[in-house]
Image: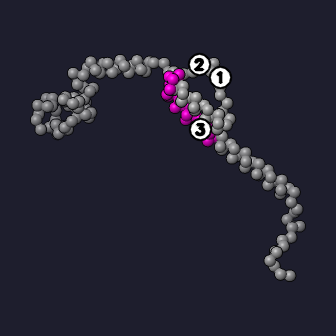
């Protein structure tokens, strides 16, 4: 490989990394990022991309400082006691994201929490059904005659 593509002082064994940025870090190790097309450096170390890097940093800073779109505090709560209520909430949330009224991150949280709510509601319903069945069984046991008084009759047995 031609040594003119690498900075002076780069160890010979590091010169075999074709497509790898040739920037040397403070500890002497080489940057492991891929080079930009037509350059020996990655985006972060290419001296010719300084203006692009600065623009990306400014854009990222503006994006991070942008306030998250959320609903007003006086937005009424929705009932969430049935699956139909939750479906209605999800449909409304999808439309609010589409209109830019709420941030997609907020809608992701709503969707995640709605899933948890539906699972909890299913578990609650099963627990209530089990409690009712146990109550019926307990009532039947209380009304049953003592076991010593029960006589088993085998209908297939011959007398």
Residue 3, image x, y percentages: 11, 34
Q: Which quadrant of the figure contains the C terminus? A: bottom right
Q: Which of 114/47 is in front?
A: 114
Residue extending farthest bottom? 159
Q: Are marks 3 and 2 in contact (CB under 8 Å)?
A: no
Q: Which residue is mark 3?
A: 116
Disc nearer the start of the sequence (1/3): 1
Where residue 72 is drawn, which disc sits there?
A: 2
Residue 72, image x, y percentages: 59, 18
Residue 113, image x, y percentages: 58, 34
Residue at x 10%, y 35% (from the top left corner): 2
In space, the residues marked 1 and 3 are separated at their CA atoms by 21 Å
Residue at x 66%, y 44% (from the top left corner): 123
Where residue 55 is drawn, which disc sits there?
A: none
**Residue 117 drawn in magenta:** yes
Q: Which residue is mark 1?
A: 76
Q: Which of 28/36 is in front?
A: 36
Disc nearer the start of the sequence (3/2): 2
**Residue 111 drawn in magenta:** yes
Q: Which quadrant of the figure contains the N terminus? A: top left
Please give the range of residues in magenta.
98-120
Looking at the image, is mark 3 or mark 2 nearer the viewer? 2
């Amino acid at each position: 490989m031609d040594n003119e593509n690498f900075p002076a002082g780069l160890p010979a064994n590091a010169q075999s990394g074709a497509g790898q940025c040739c920037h040397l870090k403070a500890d002497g190790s080489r940057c492991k990022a891929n080079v930009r097309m037509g350059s020996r450096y990655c985006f972060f170390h290419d001296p010719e991309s300084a203006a692009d890097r600065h623009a990306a940093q400014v854009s990222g800073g503006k994006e991070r400082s942008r306030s998250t779109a959320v609903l007003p505090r006086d937005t009424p709560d929705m009932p969430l006691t049935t699956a139909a209520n939750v479906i209605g909430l999800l449909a409304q949330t999808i439309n609010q994201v589409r209109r830019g009224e709420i941030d997609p991150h907020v809608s992701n949280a709503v969707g995640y929490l709605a899933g948890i709510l539906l699972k909890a509601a299913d578990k609650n319903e099963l627990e209530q059904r089990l409690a009712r069945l146990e109550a019926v069984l307990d009532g039947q046991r209380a009304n049953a005659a003592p076991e010593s008084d029960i006589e088993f009759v085998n209908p297939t047995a011959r007398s």
